[in-house]
Amino acid sequence: MKKIIFLLAALCSAFSYAQESYKHEPVANKAEYYAGKYNERKDMGDLLAWAGKFEDWQNESGLYASMSTSIMVPYFIQNTAASDIVWLNIWPTSTAQYKGLENWLVNGGELMSKLPVTNSQVIDTAQWPISAPEGEGTIGMVRYSDCKLKEGVSGRQAFDAYKEFAIAAKEKGDNLGRKMIFPAAGGTQGDYDYVYSLYANKVSELGEASDLYWAEINGSDEDVALNEVVESCTNSRMYSSKNIKASNN
């Protein structure tokens, strides 16, 4: 029940916040996760070729300029057979997202029929970005964890703690992206309040950030403050990631 109440509150407030005494204001966005397996005799090359056609199709309407897309491949994960890839679309608002979905449902049937992947799970989420990495890379890496807050702690309190931690970590040389993610429709059920995303534009930077944390950030005031609001983070899984399309925003 706690999870249901938390998610409803987070989603309802994601785009309209009451005036409260928080230090940082989340700027929410939306994201769609499509997890699937390749069809018979299909592989990443086929998917990338399809992605090129998909981008050409998007350009016809102009509705997808604000959407960014990446493809993730399971790497460190409990069940590598569960999916071959995860296709991720990120939108700035629900309005933009659902205009794009409407156009896809009305006009995308022919292209959809040629998709070389069969999806097994599709998840609609709201996201609160905490930090973003600088620079670009060809192959990145992302870690997701299912997290619970301590009793009586709100999502906004946790966001403030994460934000302060990210600012302090950046001063030490950290260059990672972080998000609090709130799965809604299609999300996997479980005893967690949100999904925490930690990501890098380059695979090597995730390793460097881990060493930096243990050498210079662990035990800092911001680290202690974050541990005071987060009860636990479990079920960590990691994916390599490749950017397919950047937004024009």
Image (cartoon, rainbow, N blue to C red):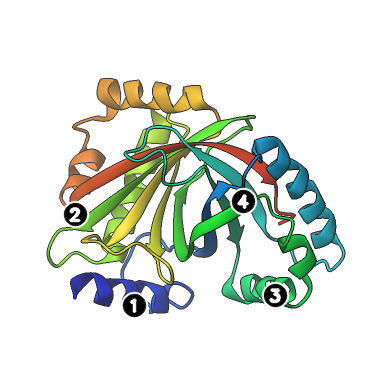
Q: For marks 4 and 2, give the one nearer the viewer.
A: 4
- Horizontal side of 100 relative to 156 (left or right) equals right
Q: Quadrant of the N terminus?
A: bottom left
Element under disc 4: strand
Instruction: State which tag comes first along the sequence, 3 or 1.
Output: 1
Q: Are marks 1 and 2 in contact (CB under 8 Å)?
A: no
What amino acid type should be assigned to the residue bearing mark 3? Leu
Q: Name the residue under label 3.
A: 105
| Front one among 196 and 154 | 196
Q: Name the residue under label 1.
A: 8
Determine the residue positioned at 60% across, 64% down. Answer: 92
What separation in Å lies between label 1 and label 2 (alpha carbons)?
20 Å
What separation in Å lies between label 2 and label 3 (alpha carbons)?
41 Å
Instruction: State which tag comes first along the sequence, 1 or 2.
Output: 1
Q: Position of residue 87 (x, y in %)?
A: 58, 51
| Front one among 245 and 52 | 52
Q: In which quarter of the image is the C terminus?
A: bottom right
Q: Position of residue 28 (x, y in %)?
A: 49, 64
Q: Do the residues labelled 4 and 3 touch (CB within 8 Å)?
A: no
Q: Is any part of residue 215 visible from this angle?
A: yes
Q: Mark 4 points at which residue?
A: 117
Q: For marks 4 and 3, give the one nearer the viewer.
A: 4
What amino acid type should be assigned to the residue bearing mark 1? Leu
What separation in Å lies between label 1 and label 4 (alpha carbons)?
32 Å
What separation in Å lies between label 4 and label 2 (alpha carbons)?
40 Å
| Front one among 32 and 214 | 32
Instruction: State which tag comes first along the sequence, 4 or 3.
Output: 3
Check residue 229 in the rendering and tell me which mark sits there, or answer none.
Answer: 2
Q: In which quarter of the image is residue 201?
A: top right
